[in-house]
Image (tube, grey):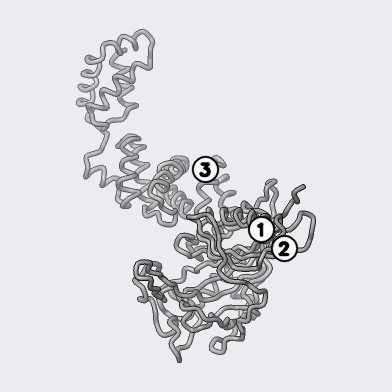
Amino acid sequence: MSKEYEVVIGLEVHVELNTKTKIFCGCSTAFGGAPNTHVCPVCSGMPGSLPVLNKGVVEKAIAVGLATHCDITRNSKFDRKNYFYPDNPQNYQISQLYYPICRNGYVAIKDANGEEKHVRIHEIHMEEDAGKLVHDAFTDETYVDFNRSGVPLIEIVSEPDMRSADEVIAYLEGLRETIQYLDASDCKLNEGSMRADVNLSIREKGTEEFGTRTESKNLNSFRAIKRCIENEVNRQIDLLESGEKVVQETRRWDDEKGYSYPMRSKEDAQDYRYFPDPDLVPISVSEEWIEEIRGRQPEMRAEKIERYKEEYQLPDYDIDQLTGEKKLADLFEGAVAAGADPKKASNWLMTETMRLMKETNTDASNLRFSAENLAELIALVDAKEINGAVAKEVFEKAVFSDNLSPVQYVKDNNLSTKADDGVLSEVVDKAIAANPKAVEDIRNGKGKAIGAIVGFVMKEMKGKCDPATVNKMISEKLN
């Protein structure tokens, strides 16, 4: 009889903080610059260069710690983690081992039974990111880009509290949501600003002792993380069932091929020769500073959900969708503040916006249009300046794509559906004359037949009229 196994998972999540400059120098942290253009003697590891701590990094780390219920370390400091790798220019990384900035927090998730569960956070520490190796398959050469070297990171280390891939995704979604609401990072997995290392082992159900764990490195999408976990669980079970042992090692997941392969063996006590960084003074975090940061914390999702229920009377589904991404919530509130009806603003964001986001593979954080332009579009529809079909065209071609003023776009492209009553009346007369069978059906009580006449009018007017107005005019003429 086959044994039953339990999965044990802990995560190390690296998040790039969105400060304008790096953690120990004034170089830009902007993503996507030409290779080695965001560098200086400090972040490229030149001898004699000295680091200076960016205060904004500490404040963002504390903000994340407060939002995840952590204790803030009052006297924190940096350490040197010594190792050689080509994209690590100093041959050490400035990190925190002994006194991390935050400890002992948690993220609340829902387990498989829908019950609240706390995934404990062991610590959050600050560190600098390494550079990036770029391999040219054509020339078989590898290049080093130091733009990312020195970009500020927080590493969020969980306890081994997760028991399934679904719990891991729920934890990561909770972390990402919290950090995005704090505006501490955009948490774009595809750009590497949020990446996770998965530590996973299995054990027989009912036993307390952990199994031998493996670490899967730098997974950069929720889909890849879930597939990697499911694959690794099956791999370890197959090993144990066949009488083999799981080897403690670091593995690389290939999402395209759907399998993992070993990178290097992993021992519990790698000799990184940590020691306090002699160039950086300790960080003293006062109660006053903590309270100042706490006072700047924004309204988080749970609070926003309750406020939306009370203030806007929206359905729960709408509220869940709108608050799931901070950018959508900001656009919604901005449109309402600019005069839009809450439900109409919600509908535009949940239907057309989300449809176009999916079609264009656009992340919510990359939406370019303003809340004011969305409100302007809704006002045009309310005033019957444009009908629903034209409004969708204007939203897609002008608002979503280029953040253009809907009013100006409608004017420039002659899209107004406010037709001269005299002209519309003539076209309705023409439609009635051209559709005698529909007229007869209407007079015999078949109300749906009016659609043929409305369609004729809309075609003649090239969509630039309001269907409700056309319906009303036809009914008046036939009565």
Q: Quadrant of residue 159?
A: bottom right
Q: Quadrant of residue 14?
A: bottom right
Q: Secondary structure at mark 2?
A: loop
Q: Write down the residue under mark 2.
A: 211
- Nearer the camera: disc 2 or disc 3: 2
Which of the labelled discs sits on residue 236, or is there none?
Answer: 1
Q: Nearer the viewer, residue 375 or 63?
A: 63
- Label 1 and label 2: CA atoms lie apart by 10 Å
Q: Amino acid at mark 3?
A: Asp
Which of the labelled discs sits on residue 318, or is there none?
Answer: 3
Q: Is residue 299 left or right of residue 137?
A: right
Q: Amino acid at mark 1?
A: Gln
Mark 3: give few (<14), some (14-19) or many (20+) Cα within 10 Å. Answer: some
- Nearer the camera: disc 1 or disc 2: 1
Q: Amino acid at mark 2?
A: Gly
Instruction: Classify the position of the C terminus by image quarter.
Output: top left
Rendered residue at 47%/88% (across/down): 50
- Nearer the camera: disc 1 or disc 3: 1
- Visible residue check, residue 368: yes
- Label 1 and label 3: CA atoms lie apart by 42 Å
Expressed as whole percent of the image width and height from the top left, the position of residue 414 reads 22, 39
Q: Quadrant of residue 379?
A: top left
Rendered residue at 68%/55% (across/down): 237
